[in-house]
């Protein structure tokens, strides 16, 4: 009697999984992701001095790489943030901010692992050619996320901090931001930018299911530009320069997404042509 190939047995087992078994599988992927984030957060929590002195507080000092880079170009492009002190108004503000920063950094650093757990959950439901394509998707997603976070940290944050810390409505008003507000703004400049940079990947999946086409994206390019600027205004301070700093790269990503959608459409048409011929 001929033996059933192992890959066929595996496919049959995966198809026989019930809805609740899928939920159980998803639960364990979520649990492992959360445990990974918690463990990394504990490690970051124990690195308090390094995290705050060299990462969190770095953009408010003149020796930050961004300020040094622009000042090395010319005196015209040179700028530095104004000197300001961070204060705390609540008894446990420093402690709870410490926890918040640890979790924030943990989510950023553990993002590849979180996405990997998500990939392991959806992988059994994909075809072989989709699995091969998804291997590059995992790498691309991770790369775009870290690129967005780095852009928010090294580009948006210095300009935003300089503008907000130096903005005054009168001589009687002195900028003395709280530690919590400073950290919240720094998170707003980095984490959302990492997700914004996932646009080409999102368009890739939307194009595969036929929800968007390159023709539609080209037709509504001007509308997209307005929406991008509005979105940049929401996640950045009311500074035109900072809004364009995030708006321009996101619009470039939009143009890249059009190319991605075009390639997906072309590949789908080629597959359909092959299927019709056979």
Image (cartoon, grey):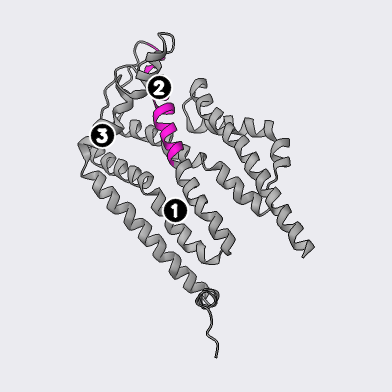
Q: Where is residue 206 drawn, in percent x and y?
A: 63, 50
Q: Residue at x 36, y 60 (%)?
A: 32
Circle 2 is placed at which residue position? 164
Circle 3 is placed at which residue position? 52
Q: Where is residue 228 drawn, in percent x and y?
A: 58, 33
- Is label 1 in contact with label 2 (beta carbons under 8 Å)? no
Q: What's the magenta region? A: 146-170
Q: Earlier in the sequence, mark 2 or mark 3?
A: 3
Circle 1 is placed at which residue position? 115
Secondary structure category for the residue under label 2? helix
| Residue 89 at least partly seen | no
Q: Earlier in the sequence, mark 1 or mark 3?
A: 3
Q: Residue at x 37, y 61 (%)?
A: 31
Q: Residue at x 26, y 28 (%)?
A: 87
Q: Residues within 10 Å of mark 2 (few under 14, many from 20)?
A: some
- Nearer to us in this view, 76 or 95: 76
């Amino acid at each position: 009697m001929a033996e059933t190939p192992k890959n066929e047995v595996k496919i049959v087992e995966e198809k026989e999984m019930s809805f609740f078994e899928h939920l159980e599988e998803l639960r364990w992927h979520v649990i492992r992701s959360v445990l990974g984030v918690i463990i990394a957060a504990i490690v970051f929590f124990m690195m308090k001095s390094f995290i705050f002195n060299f990462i969190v507080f770095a953009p408010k000092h003149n020796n930050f790489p961004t300020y040094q880079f622009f000042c090395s170009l010319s005196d015209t492009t040179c700028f530095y943030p104004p000197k300001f002190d961070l204060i705390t108004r609540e008894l446990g503000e420093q402690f709870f901010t410490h926890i918040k920063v640890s979790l924030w950094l943990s989510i950023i650093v553990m993002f590849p692992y979180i996405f990997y757990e998500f990939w392991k959950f959806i992988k059994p439901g994909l075809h072989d050619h989709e699995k091969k394509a998804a291997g590059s998707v995992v790498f691309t997603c991770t790369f775009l996320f870290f690129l967005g976070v780095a852009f928010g940290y090294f580009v948006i944050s210095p300009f935003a901090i300089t503008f907000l810390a130096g903005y005054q409505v009168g001589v009687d008003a002195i900028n003395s931001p709280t530690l919590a507000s400073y950290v919240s703004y720094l998170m707003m400049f980095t984490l959302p930018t990492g997700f914004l940079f996932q646009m080409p990947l999102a368009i890739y999946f939307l194009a595969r299911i036929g929800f968007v086409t390159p023709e539609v994206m080209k037709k509504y390019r001007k509308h997209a530009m307005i929406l991008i600027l509005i979105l940049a205004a929401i996640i950045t301070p009311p500074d035109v320069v900072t809004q364009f700093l995030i708006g321009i790269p996101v619009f470039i990503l939009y143009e890249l997404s059009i190319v991605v959608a075009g390639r997906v459409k072309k590949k789908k048409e080629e597959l359909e042509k092959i299927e019709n011929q056979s």
